[in-house]
């Protein structure tokens, strides 16, 4: 049965107003997040689109869908609101857009099912639960980040991808990079970070809020965790230096070629072959060789480091990188002098050690290398580890980055002078 647009808009507004009231009465810590979304009626849209500030709906579609699924209004508001709270649109590091969209949709729907919000039931729920239980065999804590890593590592069949999209998608996702280009009126990542922190704090103080609290907290913890750009931090280890190469800003090819043409092998002006650029020349990579840091995780870390340095042009022709393996003592030190050395090392790495972890010997060893002038212009140290060990008490006079191979609540607190990076962010 067709419905007039004007009537559809009136009914659609009532549906969504009731949905918002239902959510905020039961879950008061979501009130601020929901308030950030203004409802916009857009006849002919034929879908639902949320951009962090507005929820655009086709009123005729909403009323028609609501007639078949009375839980749609509540479900739609919860779905788009949780995307914002968990900062899903702002994870620019996820290169596979389709996988990230599916992972984030499944994560928020899992939370909504756990919350058991009155009036939010839909006919697809049982199918969703079946899929979620199957996925939890591989990803016990179903957050968007961990689910994405599973998809990226093992792939998704076309049939599974189609099924996931049918069961878990509610709104049409925009390309994540487009959020960087929005005008100032659109809520920014920083705005949603503040909302996420508030929800996290209120949820912790309102622990008896009902079912779903654990799932919300797990995703909030992931969303609000401090992240660093690994390439940006590597650039902190870069120095300005000269390399023998043509400087296109100062070399005039017209006079040069004219001289060759008129006088044979006598150019009129010699090219300026020295150009300054910032590149990585000297730093230390320490690898914790205790039992929990071995095999593929070490190779993944070395591969990522190699890719960043080689693709981004951050290598000088001649470099001095020490790759040190250490558990409770320094086991080996491989000196890398050029890009080929680093490639050979990461392709043929052999882990040595597997004892207990003590970070101090590496720093003592670096001090010795500096005293011997084997390190003359050290810019920083990267320490790949599980984090379970003894940290130095004093702050060194160079940058130190600890790259952890996962999140571990049991590891000691990192010293304030160190930079933290989680391997999943690398």
Image: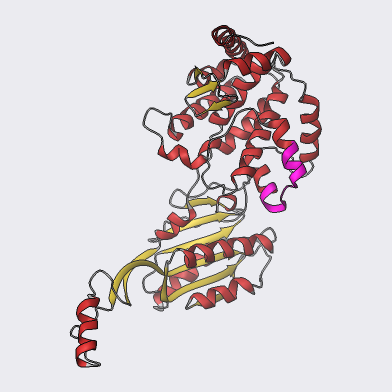
Q: How many marks?
A: 0
Q: Is residue 367 rendered magenta in the image?
A: no
* Along the line of sight, the residue nearer the viewer: 339 or 101: 101
Q: In the shown orientation, is residue 410 left or right of residue 260?
A: right
* Along the line of sight, the residue nearer the viewer: 123 or 356: 123
Q: Is residue 419 visible?
A: yes
Residue 208 appears at what percent x and percent y?
66, 18
Please identify the quarter of the rendering in which residue 190 is found.
Answer: top left
The vertical placement of 182 against 259, above or below, is above
What is the chief secondary structure element of the magenta stretch? helix
Residue in the picture at 46% in, 39% down: 178
Residue in the picture at 62% in, 39% down: 101
* Along the line of sight, the residue nearer the viewer: 17 or 288: 17
Q: Quadrant of the N terminus?
A: top right
Residue 258 appears at what percent x and percent y?
21, 83
Q: In the shown orientation, is residue 24 left or right of residue 134?
A: left
Magenta residues span 151-163
Please identify the quarter of the rendering in which residue 405 is found.
Answer: bottom right
Please identify the quarter of the rendering in which residue 236 is found.
Answer: bottom left
The vertical placement of 28 against 178, above or below, is above
Q: Is residue 331 visible?
A: no
Residue 302 appears at what percent x and percent y?
58, 65
Q: In the shown orientation, is residue 265 left or right of residue 159?
A: left
Render colour scheme: secondary structure
Residue in the picture at 62% in, 46% down: 407
Q: Quadrant of the C terminus?
A: bottom right
Q: In the shown orientation, is residue 82 left or right of residue 280?
A: right
């Amino acid at each position: 049965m067709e419905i007039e647009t004007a009537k559809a808009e009136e009914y659609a507004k009532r549906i969504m107003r009731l949905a918002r009231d239902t959510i905020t009465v039961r879950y008061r810590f979501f009130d601020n997040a929901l308030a950030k979304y203004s409802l916009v009626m857009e006849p002919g849209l034929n879908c639902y689109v949320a951009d962090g500030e507005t929820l655009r709906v086709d009123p005729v579609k909403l009323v028609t869908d609501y007639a078949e699924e009375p839980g749609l209004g509540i479900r739609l508001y919860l779905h788009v609101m949780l995307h914002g709270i968990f900062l899903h649109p702002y994870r620019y590091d996820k290169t596979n857009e389709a996988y990230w969209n599916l992972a984030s949709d499944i994560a928020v729907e899992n939370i909504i099912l756990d919350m058991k919000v009155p009036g939010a039931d839909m006919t697809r729920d049982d199918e969703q639960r079946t899929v979620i239980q199957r996925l939890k065999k591989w990803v016990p804590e179903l957050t968007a980040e961990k689910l994405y890593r599973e998809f990226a590592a093992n792939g998704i069949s076309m049939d599974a991808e189609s099924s996931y999209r049918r069961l878990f998608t509610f709104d049409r996702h925009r390309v994540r990079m487009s959020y960087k280009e929005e005008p100032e009126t659109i809520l920014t990542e920083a705005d949603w970070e503040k909302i996420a922190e508030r929800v996290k704090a209120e949820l912790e103080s309102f622990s008896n809020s009902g079912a779903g609290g654990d799932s919300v907290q797990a995703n909030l913890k992931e969303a609000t965790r401090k992240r660093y750009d690994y390439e940006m931090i590597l650039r902190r280890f870069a120095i300005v230096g000269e390399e023998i190469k043509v400087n296109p800003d100062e070399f005039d090819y017209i006079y040069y070629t004219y001289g060759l043409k008129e006088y044979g092998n006598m150019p009129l002006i010699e090219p300026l072959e020295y150009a300054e650029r910032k590149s990585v020349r000297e730093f230390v990579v320490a690898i914790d060789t205790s039992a929990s840091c071995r095999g593929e995780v070490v190779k993944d870390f070395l591969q990522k480091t190699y890719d960043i340095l080689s693709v981004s042009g951050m290598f000088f022709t001649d470099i001095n990188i020490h790759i040190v393996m250490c558990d409770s003592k320094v086991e080996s030190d491989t000196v890398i002098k050029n890009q080929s050395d680093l490639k050979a090392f990461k392709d043929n790495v052999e882990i040595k050690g597997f004892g207990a972890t003590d970070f101090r010997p590496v720093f003592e060893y670096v001090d010795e290398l500096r005293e011997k002038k084997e390190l003359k212009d050290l810019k920083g140290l990267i320490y790949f580890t599980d984090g379970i060990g003894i940290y130095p008490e004093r702050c060194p006079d160079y940058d130190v980055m600890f790259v952890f191979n996962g999140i571990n609540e049991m590891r000691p607190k990192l010293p304030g002078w160190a930079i933290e990076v989680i391997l999943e962010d690398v």
